[in-house]
C-alpha cells in the first residue's frame, strides 16, 4: 500500500496543499515550524482516527476555518482509492471512499500507516492512558470492528459512572441498584472482549518487538510487554507512581474465563465504587508494563533505551500489520526522528525500514537523513510545497 497524492484544505497551517508522493522513501524537509509534521499527521489520522500530537480534532482545523479536509489517493494491488476526511468544528466528522460516504470509524479499513515521532517517548515514560490508546489504535488497525467495540464500551462506562455518581449523591442502598446489574453485564461483555484482544495483541507483538529492538539498538536487552489487568488484581495506580505493579502475566486467556474474573472483581469492588462514584476496574484502567532486562523501562531505562524501546514498538507494530493485514505493508512514517540519532543508529534505522513499500520522513536538516532515504525530496516552507522531486 502507498499514497500517491495528498491534498489538504484548511488543515493546520495549510490553506491548500497538493503533495505528490512516490513509492519508496519520501523526505519532507524544511525548517522547524514550516508544516512538515502537519503533512504526515494528516495521514496518521486516516489510519488511527487520532493525532500523535493533540487529543482534540479542533486543533487540526486552520484558524478561522469551520472545517479541514484531507484527501489521499491510495494505490494497493492495482486498485486506486480516493480516501477523504472532513474534520468539522460544529458537527460530526465525515468520511468518503471513492466519493461514497462511509462512517468515519471505518477509515482504517482502507488505509494503514504506522507513525513514530519524538512524542512517542511518552509510551515508555508517560501515563497508562497513553499506552492504552496506542494498543487500542493498533487493535482497530488490525481489525476495524474494534472501533465499534471501543465506542460501545466507552458509552456503557459513561452510563455506569453516571448511575454510580447518582447513587452516591442520593444515598441509594446497594440492594436497590438493580439497574447497575444490567450495566455490569454490558461492561463485562464488552470489556472482556477488549481485555482478551489486548492480551492477544501483546503476545503477537513479542517476537517482532525483540527483533525490532535488536535492529535499531544493536543489542538484545530482552524487551518485554506485560499486561497489567485490574480485573486480576493489578493496582495500576502503583505503576503511575513508581513504575512497579503486582500483576500476573496473562497468556492464552479465554473470553469465558475473563468474563468470570471481571464479574467476580466487580462484586469485590462494588462498595468502593458506590463510595467513589466511579468504575474502578476494567480495560479503561489497565496498563501494559514495558520491561528491559527484567526491569521496568519506566524509571530504569536510560533516555536512549527508552527511545529505542518506543521506536522498536512502532516497528514491531508495522511488522505485525505487514504480516496480517489484507492491505499489505502499512505506510511507515518517521517524524523528526533522525536528528535524535547518531550516524551509526541512523544507518541501522535506514536498514530496518528499507523493505517497506513506502516510507515518509520529516527532517529539519537534509544531511541528517541517510542518502538512501532521500530519493524523493519535498521541501516545505511556511505551509507551502516549494519544491518536489529527486535530489
Image: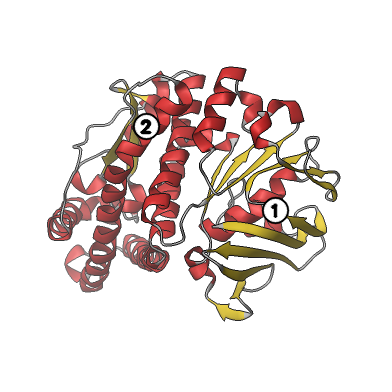
How packed is label 1: few (under 14 Cα within 10 Å), some, or many (20 or more)?
Answer: many
Residue hosting label 1: 21
Q: Callout 2: helix, strand or loop?
A: helix
Return the x and y of residue 330 as percentages of the image width and height: 50, 52
Q: Quadrant of the N terminus?
A: bottom right
How packed is label 2: few (under 14 Cα within 10 Å), some, or many (20 or more)?
Answer: some
Q: Callout 1: helix, strand or loop?
A: loop
Residue 374: quarter of image: top right
Looking at the image, residue 157 lies above or below residue 53: below
- Image-based side of 317 in relation to 47, left or right: left
Q: Which one is earlier in the sequence, the residue at label 1 or at label 2?
A: 1
Is any part of residue 129 visible from this angle? Answer: no
Q: Residue at x 75, y 61 (%)?
A: 8
Q: Which mark is on residue 211? A: 2
Q: Residue at x 27, y 53 (%)?
A: 195
Looking at the image, residue 146 lies above or below residue 305: below
In front: 310, or 57? 310
Q: Quadrant of the C terminus?
A: top right
In front: 375, or 302? 375
- Image-based side of 339 in relation to 125, left or right: right
Residue 31: quarter of image: top right
Please report contact status of discs 1 and 2: CB closer than 8 Å, yes or no.
no
Return the x and y of residue 36 as percentages of the image width and height: 74, 44
In front: 330, or 16? 330
Q: Residue at x 79, y 59 (%)?
A: 18
Return the x and y of residue 39 as percentages of the image width and height: 70, 51
Q: Residue furthest front?
A: 78
Amino acid at each position: 500500500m502507498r499514497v500517491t497524492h495528498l491534498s489538504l484544505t484548511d488543515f493546520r497551517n495549510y490553506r491548500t496543499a497538493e503533495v505528490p508522493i512516490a513509492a519508496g522513501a519520501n523526505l519532507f524537509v524544511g525548517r522547524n515550524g514550516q508544516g512538515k509534521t502537519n503533512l504526515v499527521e494528516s495521514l496518521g489520522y486516516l489510519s488511527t482516527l487520532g493525532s500523535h500530537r493533540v487529543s482534540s480534532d479542533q486543533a487540526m482545523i486552520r484558524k478561522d476555518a469551520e472545517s479541514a479536509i484531507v484527501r489521499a489517493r491510495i494505490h494497493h494491488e492495482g486498485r486506486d482509492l480516493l480516501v477523504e476526511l472532513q474534520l468539522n468544528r460544529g458537527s460530526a466528522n465525515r468520511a468518503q471512499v471513492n466519493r461514497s460516504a462511509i462512517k468515519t470509524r471505518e477509515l482504517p479499513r482502507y488505509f494503514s500507516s504506522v507513525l513514530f515521532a519524538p512524542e512517542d517517548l511518552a509510551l515508555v515514560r508517560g501515563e497508562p492512558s497513553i499506552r492504552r490508546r496506542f494498543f487500542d489504535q493498533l487493535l482497530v488497525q488490525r481489525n476495524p470492528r474494534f472501533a465499534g467495540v471501543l465506542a460501545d464500551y466507552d458509552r456503557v462506562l459513561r452510563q455506569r459512572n453516571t448511575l454510580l455518581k447518582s447513587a452516591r449523591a442520593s444515598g441509594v442502598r446497594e440492594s436497590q441498584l438493580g439497574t447497575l446489574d444490567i450495566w455490569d453485564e454490558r461492561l463485562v461483555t464488552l470489556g472482556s472482549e477488549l481485555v482478551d484482544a489486548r492480551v492477544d495483541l501483546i503476545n503477537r507483538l513479542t517476537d517482532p518487538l525483540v527483533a525490532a529492538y535488536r535492529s535499531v539498538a544493536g543489542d538484545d536487552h530482552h524487551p518485554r510487554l506485560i499486561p497489567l489487568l485490574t480485573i486480576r488484581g493489578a493496582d495500576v495506580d502503583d505503576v503511575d507512581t513508581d513504575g512497579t505493579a503486582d500483576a500476573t502475566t496473562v497468556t492464552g486467556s479465554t473470553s469465558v474465563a475473563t468474563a468470570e474474573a471481571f464479574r467476580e472483581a466487580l462484586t469485590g469492588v462494588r462498595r468502593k465504587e458506590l463510595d467513589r462514584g466511579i468504575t474502578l476496574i476494567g480495560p479503561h484502567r489497565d496498563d501494559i508494563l514495558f520491561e528491559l532486562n527484567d526491569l521496568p523501562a519506566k524509571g530504569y531505562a536510560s533516555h536512549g533505551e527508552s527511545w529505542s524501546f518506543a521506536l522498536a514498538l512502532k516497528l514491531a507494530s508495522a511488522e505485525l500489520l505487514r504480516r496480517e493485514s489484507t492491505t499489505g505493508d502499512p505506510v511507515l512514517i518517521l517524524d523528526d526522528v533522525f536528528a535524535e540519532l547518531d550516524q551509526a543508529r541512523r544507518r541501522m534505522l535506514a536498514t530496518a525500514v528499507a523493505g517497506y513499500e513506502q516510507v515518509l520522513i520529516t527532517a529539519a536538516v537534509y544531511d541528517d537523513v541517510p542518502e538512501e532515504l532521500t530519493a524523493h525530496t519535498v521541501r516545505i516552507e511556511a505551509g507551502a510545497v516549494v519544491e518536489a522531486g529527486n535530489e
